[in-house]
Amino acid sequence: MTTKSTKYSHQREAIIKYLESTTNHPTADEVYQHMRELIPNISLGTVYRNLSQMAASGRILRLTADGKTDHFDACTSTHYHFMCKSCGCVRDIPIAPLDSLVEDAKKVSEHVVEDVSIMFSGTCKDCLVKSVDN
Amino acid sequence: MTTKSTKYSHQREAIIKYLESTTNHPTADEVYQHMRELIPNISLGTVYRNLSQMAASGRILRLTADGKTDHFDACTSTHYHFMCKSCGCVRDIPIAPLDSLVEDAKKVSEHVVEDVSIMFSGTCKDCLVKSVDN
DNA sequence: CTAATAACAGTAATCATTATCATAATTATG
DNA sequence: CATAATTATGATAATGATTACTGTTATTAG
């Protein structure tokens, strides 16, 4: 069995650069739309393949929130997120990491707890303004 | 504008009874498979419609974990869940509610934080046994 | 009892994502 | 450096979960 290696690709490089340049945690389709400005004939499948590959290897984070569309984050250190119930945008929440949470869960659970995902939700400031206008 | 009311249905009654009888947090399809034993010609659409309706009204909880399939829980008081990365099952994690978490997030965020979802992940005890066998 | 309306079963449509496949780009090797 | 091996790509088809549509049935109000 030969372990398969990773080859360089222009497309993957552009995707990771874009993810590192934004704190907006875009969806696969948002990444795709941006990439098309740089690489007009890039395929949506290429974007999905590279995002999934980088998420699997730990290079980026896959954020699952409302069960509809995943978001991606190039910042892999422990931090938390907020999803707007109105527009679906994902933003950072600057609270301190809850280091003991997984440890606490490990102690009480009969299962092997490895990770925890914390997702806040509510209304983002932009959607709040819009709702006041109406 | 007339507010639309809710009418009784045999199907919805059976769905909520089933959800209340289990702590396994089934998916819509698992609910459907169970319902077919009681109501053989029930439609999958009916199951989805009633689950969505009850989740929207707060009667049950919709649990989103891996972005693939939602799970449902008739217990709506604050508690936490674990999803197995191997088989996808969802189980309860009996740690005490983190009451201050949403309050803390409200203080530091420029958005209107209302709720938080906490999802642990790892390997469930059943999958652990299977992996040891191999 | 009858009219109004919500819920139903069955099915088609949608959306996000993954798989397939022939071609192109990258890397290894003689 | 030439060529073989292998991974990545673009284009598109397929999948899986969920929602929408439609004609019919059940529930409820008058």
Image: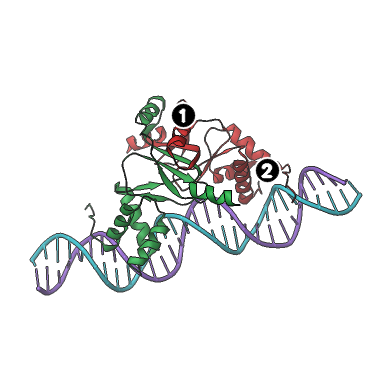
Chain colours: A green, B red, C cyan, D purple
The C terminus of chain B lies in quadrant? top left
Under circle 2, the secondary element is helix
> Residue at coordinates 59% horizontally, 37% vertically from top-left?
B60
Instruction: Name the front one of labels 1 and 2.
Output: 1
- Image coordinates of residue B22 in percent, x first then y, are 56, 33
* Label 1, residues with CA under 10 Å away: few <14, some 14-19, many ≥20: few
D13 vs B78: above or below:
below
Dot 1 falls on which chain? Answer: B
A92 vs B104: above or below:
below
Q: Of D18 and D5, which appears nearest the observer?
A: D18
Q: Are marks 1 and 2 on the same chain?
A: yes
- Image coordinates of residue B48 in percent, x first then y, are 60, 48
Amino acid under disc 2: Gln
Mark 1 vs 2, N-terminal side: 2
Amino acid under disc 1: Ser
> Residue at coordinates 51% horizontally, 51% vertically from top-left?
A87
Mark 1, residue position: B100
Mark 2, residue position: B11
Q: Of B129 and A104, which appears nearest the observer?
A: A104
Under circle 1, the secondary element is helix
Disc 1 from disc 2: Cα separation: 39 Å
- Image coordinates of residue C10 in percent, x first then y, are 65, 57
